[in-house]
Every structure is written in structure tokens, then in C-alpha cells.
Image (cartoon, rainbow, N blue to C red):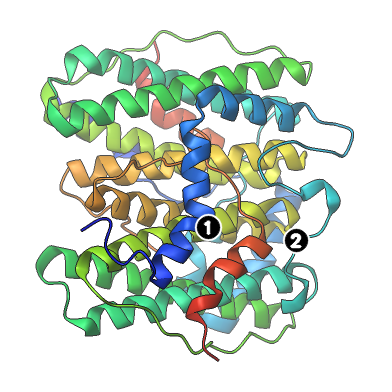
């Protein structure tokens, strides 16, 4: 069952994506990237400047609703994991902790969208094809790493400084979850020096198979 | 072991920002949520979120240069410190095996941050700050790990604290991509120590430059 994840190449690893709907912005960032690359080597710049350009409809509310969808996915995933992951000991505590955090993210994002005069997206129905602890961990790692890259990709487009700061405070927590889950998987908690950014389109494509 | 070295530089640092952050975490999620909402709902130019002073428009990094250059040089100083610390830890011989491998890996990533930030400062026409001379207490594996976790948690909070002040999109993007890596390092070290991976709870707290600089002062000797 857990092999199904491998059938989703999008989920095998978080990649820097190549599309952007916002050419003017991408030109600006690309120019900066190229200039930086000239100074200290393109290989160094590529990973992080690559795609900070995830484009979202509807400004900050649109970005927050995009984030809310991901948080719904994670919250549901960890809620189910309490019975499905067959975890014990440290992992069981970790699932409880992460699940609590994701629930709080859902609550905070929902309220914030309302306060900004927006309409929070409805909670989708999810389907997570995995079995057992190993299957859970593999999928959890993908979701957390993707979550980090999703926030990192969307954050530079946030207009409000307060919303940016809030998104930053959430993405750091997602990164902490990712590191802890990776350790449980026996993987490097921090595989690269620069967490890649992922566009909204790429993120949605990656999570689509889990949304009914 | 955990109560040893009460008077060390480690405990001075640990007693400053992090213990306070831990306290904030203990006060409960509702506090974080309230702060988050207060911050997000603010449109009057004031914010009650944590220690944020974003609305005031002062990053606290002015002594390192103007605007984004100042922020990048501030970050560069912190990264230099982390690199030096990890180098000292490796040399100390306190760690072996997988723990040593983790420390080397983190040190290598901090060194990549130094290179990238240096390049960015130059690209923007600024002068990168020189590498500070540093000295760290290396008494025991446990105390070193605790200090490393403190430094990484502080580093993550430092980047978070600067995000709202950054003007350039590519600078912000780079800072974010480093910020989450510092968060990963912090969580990994917290895990090794058996501490909570999220000392602030569901919402990480930013640290202003003044607080961060004060905390690292004991380790900068020239």
C-alpha cells in the first residue's frame, strides 16, 4: 500500500518548479538570482531563489486559504494516524504533538481569513493510502517537507507584514515537524542547506491525489 | 547532568531568550492563537504579536548596514558564530558516530549559509561583516548539545524576527529558505536532548535583533 506513494513522482521529493503565472515578478527575482549566481555560483543560488514565485489568486486571503487547505490535510492525516499508524512510545507522542499543532494552525488560519473579510475554504475530504507505521512515516515526511516548501514559496507574495510574520511562525513549526519525522524515518533532519520553495500549482498537484 | 554548570555562559544564554520562550509555550496554545490573531487582525500599525516591532519599522540591525544589507550582515554574523561553534565542537572530540555526523552536517549547512549571505551582501553593493572571533564553553557533550540547541532555536527566532523588515523579494526568499533549515536544526537537537521540538508551541516566536545580539555577546571575544 505504501508503495503507492512512490507512484507519485511529485511526492518523491520537493523540487523547485519552473512555472510561474507572474512574469514581472519572476523576472525581478530571476535577475537577482542571476546576479547572485555570478558572485558565488549558480549552484548555490538555485535551490532557494528558484521558486519563491508561487502565485495565488486573491492576495493574502487567497494565500491563507491555500495554506488552510494544506493544514486541513495535515490535521486530518494526524488525526487518522492516531489509530492507523500503529505508533507507540516517542512516535505516538510526536503524532499527538504534531496533530495538535496542525489543529491550531487550522483554527488560526480560519479566524484570520474571517478577520480579513474572506471566506475560509471548506474542509475537503481526504483519502490517505498507507498502512502501518512505515507507510505513515513516509507520507508524513512528504507532507511536512511539502508544507515547508509551500509556505516558503507563498510567503514572499504576502502583502501584510503581520500575515507574513504569522506565516513565518507556522512554517518554522512545519520545518520542526519535518525534522522530527525525518529522524523517525532514519533520514537526515535537514537534507539541504536551503529549503526549496514550491509554487502553489506544484503543491496542489502534489496533494491532489489525497483529496477526494 | 541537566543541572550542572549553572553558572556557565550556557546557562546565561539559556536563561535569557529560550527559557522565556519555553515559558511562553507553557502558558498555552490559546495565548499563541490570540497573539497570532491579534497580529493578523491589526491594521492600525500596531501589533501585539510576541516581541514583534515590525510596525515600528526598525529591524534593530542598523549597525550592520542599511536596510536589507544590514539584515543580511546581521544574519551573516549569526551564521559565522554557528559555523565556528560547530567547528569547535568537532575539534573537541566530545562526539562520535552519528551525533558527530549530524554536527558536521549542520556545520556544513551553516557554512553554506555564510557563503550565500556573503554573496548577497556583495551583490547588493554592501561590505560583508568580518568573521567575529568566538569562544564557546565545551565542557561536556550534554552541555554542548544544550548550547547548540539554544543557538539554533535563537537563530531560527532571529530570522523570523527579521522577515517583516526585508524589502527585496529574493532576499526574503533566501532568508525564508535558511530560516526553516535553522528550525530543522533546532528540532533535531531538541530531539537529541529529549526536549520538545516546538518550544513555542504551534506558532514559533520571533526574536528581535537586540535580544539575539545580547544573547550571543558572551561568545564573541573580538
Residue at 18 percent of width and 33 percent of height:
A90
Where is residue A35? Give x, y as percent: 65, 76
Residue B16 is marked as 1
Sequence-wise, the earlier of marks 2 and 1 is 1
Q: Position of residue B31 (x, y in %)?
A: 59, 27
Check chain identity for marks 2 and 1: say if they share one: yes
Q: Residue furthest front?
A: B7
Q: Which mark is residue B88?
A: none
Mark 2 highlights which residue?
B59
Toward which corner of the image does residue A138 lie, by quadrant? top left
User: Which quadrant of the structure image shows residue A34?
Assistant: bottom right
Look at the numbered disc 1 and give the secondary structure of its residue.
Answer: helix
Name the residue at 63% across, 85% down.
B129
Subunit that carries the residue with mark 1: B
- The residue nearer to you, when weighing A99 against B205, is B205
Q: Position of residue A129 (x, y in %)?
A: 22, 18
Amino acid at each position: 500500500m505504501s508503495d503507492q506513494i512512490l507512484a507519485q513522482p511529485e511526492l518523491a521529493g520537493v523540487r523547485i518548479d519552473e512555472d510561474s503565472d507572474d512574469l514581472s515578478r519572476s523576472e525581478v527575482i530571476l535577475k537577482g538570482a542571476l546576479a547572485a549566481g555570478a558572485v558565488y555560483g549558480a549552484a548555490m543560488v538555485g535551490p532557494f531563489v528558484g521558486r519563491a514565485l508561487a502565485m495565488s489568486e486573491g492576495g493574502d486571503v487567497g494565500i491563507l486559504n491555500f495554506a488552510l487547505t494544506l493544514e486541513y490535510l495535515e490535521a486530518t492525516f494526524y488525526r487518522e494516524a492516531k489509530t492507523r499508524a500503529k505508533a507507540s512510545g516517542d512516535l505516538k507522542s510526536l503524532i499527538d504533538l504534531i496533530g495538535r499543532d496542525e489543529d491550531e494552525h487550522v483554527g488560526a488560519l480560519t479566524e484570520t481569513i474571517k478577520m480579513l473579510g474572506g471566506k475560509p475554504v471548506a474542509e475537503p475530504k481526504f483519502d490517505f493510502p498507507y498502512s502501518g507505521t512505515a507507510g505513515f512515516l513516509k507520507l508524513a515526511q512528504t507532507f511536512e517537507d511539502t508544507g515547508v516548501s509551500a509556505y516558503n514559496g507563498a510567503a514572499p507574495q504576502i502583502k501584510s507584514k503581520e500575515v507574513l510574520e504569522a506565516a513565518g511562525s507556522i512554517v518554522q513549526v512545519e520545518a520542526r515537524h519535518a525534522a522530527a519525522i525525518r529522524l523517525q524515518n532514519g533520514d537526515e533532519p535537514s537534507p539541504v542547506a536551503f529549503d526549496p520553495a514550491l509554487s502553489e500549482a506544484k503543491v496542489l498537484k502534489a496533494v491532489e491525489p489525497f483529496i477526494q | 547532568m541537566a543541572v550542572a554548570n549553572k553558572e556557565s555562559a550556557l546557562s546565561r544564554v539559556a536563561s535569557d531568550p529560550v527559557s522565556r520562550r519555553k515559558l511562553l509555550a507553557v502558558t498555552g496554545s490559546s495565548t499563541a492563537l490570540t497573539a497570532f490573531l491579534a497580529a493578523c487582525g491589526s491594521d492600525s500599525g500596531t501589533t501585539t504579536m510576541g516581541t514583534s516591532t515590525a510596525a515600528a519599522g526598525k529591524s534593530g540591525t542598523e549597525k550592520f548596514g542599511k536596510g536589507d544589507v544590514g539584515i543580511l550582515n546581521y544574519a551573516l554574523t549569526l551564521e559565522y558564530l554557528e559555523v565556528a561553534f560547530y567547528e569547535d565542537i568537532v575539534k573537541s572530540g566530545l562526539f562520535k558516530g552519528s551525533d558527530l555526523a549530524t554536527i558536521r552536517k549542520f556545520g556544513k549547512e551553516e557554512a553554506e549559509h555564510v557563503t550565500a549571505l556573503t554573496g548577497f551582501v556583495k551583490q547588493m553593493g554592501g561590505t560583508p561583516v568580518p568573521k567575529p572571533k568566538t569562544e564557546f564553553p565545551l565542557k561536556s557533550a550534554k552541555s554542548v548539545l544544550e548550547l547548540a540547541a539554544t543557538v539554533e532555536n535563537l537563530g531560527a527566532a532571529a530570522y523570523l524576527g527579521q522577515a517583516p523588515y526585508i524589502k527585496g523579494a529574493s532576499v526574503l526568499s533566501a532568508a525564508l529558505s535558511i530560516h526553516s533549515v535553522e528550525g530543522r536544526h533546532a528540532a533535531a537537537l531538541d530531539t537529541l536532548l529529549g526536549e520538545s521540538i516546538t518550544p513555542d508551541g504551534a506558532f514559533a516566536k520571533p526574536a528581535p535583533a537586540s535580544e539575539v545580539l545580547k544573547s550571543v555577546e558572551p561568545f564573541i571575544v573580538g
